[in-house]
Image: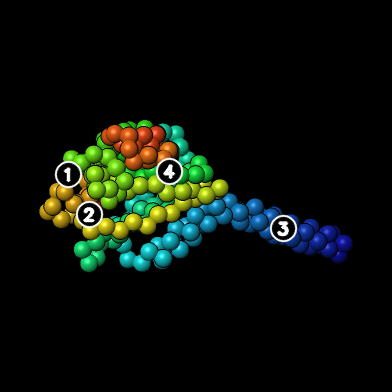
Amino acid sequence: MKYAKLILISTFLFSIASCKDVKRNSDKTKEPINKENDQEKSEANETDNNTGHADMALLLKGTSDSDVKGRVWFTEADGKVEMKVVLSGLTQGPHAIHLHENADCSAPDGKSAGGHWNPTEEPHGQWGDENGYHKGDIGNFTADSEGHASLDFSTDQWCLDCDDEKKNIIGKAVIVHEGIDDYTSQPSGNAGERVACSAIAR
């Protein structure tokens, strides 16, 4: 009888130990599942901290079957609007970025955003060109070998929700292009496919 009790106790203890091992192994397999998401959140939070307070924070989403994604921040102060952009998933090299006339990213190719925002009806050109340029002609930036890029841009020719239709960027869209803006081809600089879009809307 004593032997029977010992066998039962041993079996019970062995079962408990096995359950603990299974739980440990289960916990170990769960650890890395959200590692990539956690890293993305951490990077986003770090960028948020670096930008301080922003009046608007937007997401850039891929178009034209691209893997591009990113974030845009707009801050208005002292009569100027500052734009900060961070991107990933780009091909290495230069890319164009513009403001387009419609806050509409519904089309798969991003063309629902319309053409360049050009309230003053100027020819396309490099920002500040004395021969004319669009208010949406931001310019070019360069992605590194890992497809990451960032951009800082500031101007007194934009505003957020003001009454001046030639300055108000609310209701427009941020578009990232696959190619480079040559600053001469009309009406849009021959910048290629639209690979990311974000509607500037509150």
Residue 116 horizontal/vertical position (percent): 27, 40
Residue at left offset 58%, top offset 51%: 33
Q: Does the rendering let one see residue 200?
A: no
Residue 113 horizontal/vertical position (percent): 28, 37
Which residue is under mark 2?
158
Mark found first going from the N terminus, 3 or 2:
3
Which residue is under mark 1?
120
Report crowding for label 2: few under 14, some 14 to 19, many 20 or more residues within 10 A (C-alpha). Answer: many
Q: What is the residue that sits farthest to the front in this orientation? A: 130
Q: Which mark is residue 95?
A: 4
Q: Are marks 1 and 3 in contact (CB under 8 Å)?
A: no
Q: Is label 3 in a helix, a strand or a loop? A: helix
The Cα–Cα distance between marks 3 and 2, rounded to whole angstroms, is 61 Å
Which residue is under mark 3?
21
Residue 96 horizontal/vertical position (percent): 39, 43
Horizontal side of residue 191 vs 127, given as left or right: right
In the rendered image, the quadrant that contains the N terminus is bottom right
Judge by depth and name the residue closer to the eye, 79 or 198: 79
The Cα–Cα distance between marks 3 and 4, rounded to whole angstroms, is 52 Å
Closest to the camera, between mark 3 and mark 4, is 4
